[in-house]
Image: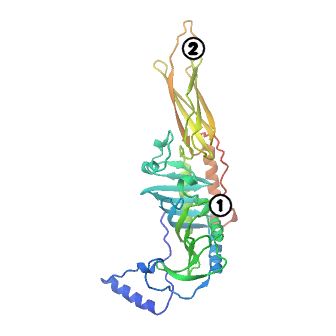
């Protein structure tokens, strides 16, 4: 998907802007000038484009109303899980349904991000996972595959806080009751800066010409039902219909192909005790194991899978598998069987069967994947048609059905 860049339109101004244009023209012929002082906080002596402030509340209200009715937003900037957290670069497009596609860069490692129907996935190299403190029996399979994560692991729940209507509601909670906004030069665009409620680090910039939200700096961008959220500094840019279509195309392609066999990093899992192997006369052998959640106060439910391999030198190798739902703080039993189908004999023999079983996770069941695809198709239609049904979906129930992949 082609990146969407913020508008760089420049508003009209006093005659002195003509002189600046002339200097820039000379710069193209070999001169250079430093424009860093034009940026907010640049420290120069250049005054704001306009010395006349305006009422902040009506300006913000109008911008948030336009934001809330938008079918999608594109953001680029920085996020940190908290005030002391590592600052990560991000570029995301978020639709009114809460569908998300984009990227987050952490410690120079790029992670592709996809969220649909409340489910959050990342696709990242092995180096990314080395920084995540995730240890699972299948962690070595995360490299370059889609892995389901929690909002805390990613540092943000983009569908919950950046979907246009929800973001508008969140920012509305920071709206000042009074005060004024003055013009600044925001990276070449004339914009009103509004100091929001809740602390000196909460600010918003609104374009003088467009009247649209161009940037926010929020200390804690938290959803209405959450007590905390990430520290953010995000620029907003226009999203065309073609961009929205591309986002949904990408999400559907990932759901249809990339989520098959995806993993789940939301809970650390392991075997609880030893595996049990029981073989009966006639050659039927059953493997049973118990998986447990090893988190300290984790939440949610993940799918766990056992892949068992049984072997005898004469009879050969046989495999079986089972999948179960594991709730946080609980255990889940996994069991599967093979049958060597030994014929009755007047001189019965004993065979020694050996085996092992691997424990892994799955980010999505086959049925869950089909339901996600259907939901995304409905949301795509509603978003592109501008329907009210395109509103951001709520997080689904933590219950997960066993995979039938």
- Nearest the viewer among 318 and 273 is 273
* Label 1 environment density (alpha carbons within 10 Å; few <14, some 14–19, many ≥20): many
Q: Is residue 75 above or below residue 61?
A: above
**Which residue is most to the bottom?**
15
Q: Is residue 69 visible?
A: no
Residue 217 horizontal/vertical position (percent): 54, 70
Q: Quadrant of residue 171?
A: bottom right
Residue, disc 2: 343
Q: Residues within 10 Å of mark 2 (few under 14, many from 20)?
A: few
Q: Name the residue furthest right.
A: 388
Residue drawn at (58%, 76%), measured in percent from left and top? 195
Q: Is 357 above or below relative to 212?
A: above
Quarter that holds the C terminus: top right
Dot placed on the residue nearer the N-terminal end, 1 or 2: 2
Q: Secondary structure at mark 1?
A: loop
Vertical position of residue 383 compared to residue 43: above or below: above
Q: How many marks?
A: 2
Where does label 1 land, which residue?
A: 392
Residue at position x 55%, y 39% in the image: 269
User: Can residue 326 be seen?
Assistant: yes
Mark 2: secondary structure? loop
Position of residue 239 in the picture relative to residue 33 (left or right): right
Q: Which mark is residue 303?
A: none
The CA distance from mark 1 to mark 2 is 60 Å
Q: Position of residue 110 (x, y in %)?
A: 45, 56
Q: Nearer the observer, disc 1 or disc 2?
A: 1
Q: Residue at x 64, y 49 (%)?
A: 371
Left or right side of 20 for 273: right
x, y percentage for residue 96? Answer: 63, 64
Image position of 10 with respect to 2: above or below: below
Question: Circles 1 and 2: CB distance less than 8 Å?
Answer: no
Q: How is the image coloured?
A: rainbow
């Amino acid at each position: 998907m082609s990146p969407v860049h913020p508008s760089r339109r420049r508003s009209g101004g006093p005659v002195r802007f003509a002189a600046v244009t002339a200097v820039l023209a000379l710069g193209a012929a070999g001169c250079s000038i430093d424009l860093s002082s034009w940026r907010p906080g640049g420290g120069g002596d250049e005054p704001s484009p306009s010395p006349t402030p305006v009422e902040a509340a009506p300006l913000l209200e109008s911008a948030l109303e336009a934001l809330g009715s938008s079918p999608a937003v594109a953001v680029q900037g920085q996020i940190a899980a908290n005030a002391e957290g590592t600052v990560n670069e991000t570029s995301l497009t978020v639709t009114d349904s809460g569908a998300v596609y984009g990227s987050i860069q952490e410690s120079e490692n790029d992670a592709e991000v996809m969220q649909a129907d409340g489910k959050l996935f990342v696709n990242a190299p092995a180096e990314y996972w080395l920084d995540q403190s995730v240890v699972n029996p299948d962690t070595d399979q995360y490299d370059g595959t889609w892995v389901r994560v929690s909002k805390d692991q990613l540092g943000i729940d983009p569908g919950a806080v950046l979907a246009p209507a929800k973001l508008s509601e969140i920012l509305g909670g920071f709206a000042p009751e009074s005060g004024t906004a003055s013009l600044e030069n925001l990276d070449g665009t004339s914009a009103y800066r509004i100091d929001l409620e809740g602390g000196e680090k909460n600010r918003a910039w609104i374009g003088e010409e467009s009247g649209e939200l161009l940037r926010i700096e929020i200390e804690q961008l938290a959803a209405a039902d959450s007590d905390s959220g990430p520290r953010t500094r995000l620029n907003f840019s226009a999203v065309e219909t073609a961009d929205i279509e591309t986002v949904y195309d990408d999400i559907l392609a990932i759901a249809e192909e990339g989520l098959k066999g995806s993993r789940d990093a939301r809970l650390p899992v392991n075997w609880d005790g030893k595996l049990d192997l029981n073989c009966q006369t006639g050659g039927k052998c059953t493997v049973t194991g118990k998986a447990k959640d090893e988190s300290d106060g984790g939440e949610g439910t993940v799918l766990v899978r056992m892949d068992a391999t049984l072997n005898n030198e004469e009879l050969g190798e046989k495999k079986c598998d089972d999948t179960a739902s594991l709730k946080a703080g609980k255990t889940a039993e996994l069991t599967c069987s093979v049958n060597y189908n030994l014929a009755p004999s007047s001189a019965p023999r004993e065979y020694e069967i050996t085996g092992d079983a691997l424990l892994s996770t799955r980010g999505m069941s086959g049925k869950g994947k089909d339901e996600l695809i259907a939901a995304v198709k409905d949301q795509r239609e509603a978003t592109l048609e501008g329907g009210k049904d395109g509103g951001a979906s709520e997080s689904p129930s933590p219950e997960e059905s066993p995979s039938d992949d």
